[in-house]
Amino acid sequence: MRAGRTAWRPLPAIVACGLLCTVTAIGQSLPGDETFSATPDHPAVAYATTPSYDAVVRLALELDSGTRRLDFEPGHGYLRSVLRALDITESSQVATFSKTSLQSPAISPANPRAIYFNDTTAVGAPSGGFIELASQDARQGLAFYILEQRAVERPRFVRPASCLGCHLSHATLNVPGALVRSVAAGPGGLSLPYIWNGTTSHRTPHAERWAGWYVTGRSSLVAHLGNTVWRPADADRQAIVDILRETTKELPPSFLGAVL
């Protein structure tokens, strides 16, 4: 943890799975590969030259004008205040424990990255890290921001270009966007893409979803890849799929409570 940061915990909530898992898009292709694909410089996008007016920009303007303030709380930093300001409910929480993020050093099965979202904006953060934000602009698509977890007089949202290292790829149709990944994670959350690595769409079978994610609730007879920490030796991809088609993966409530 960097100097000046406070250690904080993801907010308690029921976690499911799915949203954005930031890792370069490789592996299985997405349906619709033949649809619109351009570049961020396309006149319809103009990502680098057109000002964004997404929900995070509007919040930043309110902070600059003094009409709104963000409260820094022990344990959670600015997280609760940011969620309230962006009209995102705590119960939207999902959690991923794979190191497929700009904040990979802070992420592990014992310290997952919690993600909260509404229809336009997602907010993610692991304990001990900073706050990540992705917000939909009507013209540019997704814009990405960072908010440091330090108590200051006027918090600032920073828009780093480094986010596009993962969020600008074939899987996002070559314009900035979101993607959901299913990537096997080993001890400590280390990504093991040679065991399992896929981009999830609505057509992805459940047996291939949610590797590296926590999944709660009863999945009945529906198998999936969630809640599993793989060993590096588990490299037979087809064998894994065959086994999961016959089994279920449910996270014990007691373990969930210990993690979150």
Image (cartoon, rainbow, N blue to C red):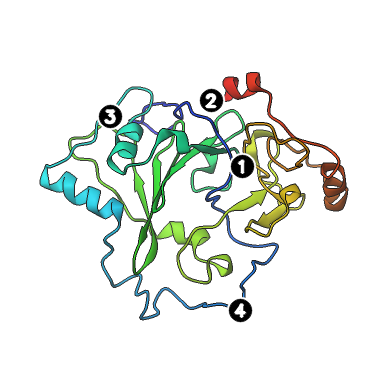
Q: Amino acid at mark 4?
A: Glu
Which SS class for mark 4?
loop
Mark toward the viewer: 4 or 1: 4
- The residue most toward the bottom is 43
N-terminal label among 1 and 2: 1
Mark-to-mark CA distance, 2 and 3: 20 Å
Q: Amino acid at mark 2?
A: Leu
Of the pair 235 and 69, the residue shown nearer to us: 69
Which SS class for mark 1?
loop
In the image, 205: left or right of 70? right
Q: Which residue is mark 1?
A: 98
Mark-to-mark CA distance, 1 and 2: 15 Å
Q: Position of residue 21 (x, y in %)?
A: 55, 50
N-terminal label among 4 and 3: 4
Q: Residue at x 34, y 75 (%)?
A: 46
Q: Residue at x 58, y 20 (%)?
A: 257
Disc 4 packing (10 Å; few <14; some 14–19; many ≥20): few
Q: Position of residue 162 (x, y in %)?
A: 44, 58
Please give the label number shown on residue 72: 3
Disc 2 packing (10 Å; few <14; some 14–19; many ≥20): some
Disc 3 packing (10 Å; few <14; some 14–19; many ≥20): some
Mark-to-mark CA distance, 3 and 1: 27 Å
- The residue most toward the front is 220
Disc 1 packing (10 Å; few <14; some 14–19; many ≥20): many
Mark-to-mark CA distance, 4 and 1: 30 Å
Mark toward the viewer: 2 or 3: 2
Q: Which residue is mark 4?
A: 34
Whether pointer 4 and pointer 1 mark residues with C-beta atoms closer than 8 Å, the reply is no
Q: Residue at x 72, y 49 (%)?
A: 206
User: Up-down: is 86 above or below 108?
Assistant: below
Q: Position of residue 181 (x, y in %)?
A: 61, 53
Mark-to-mark CA distance, 2 and 4: 41 Å
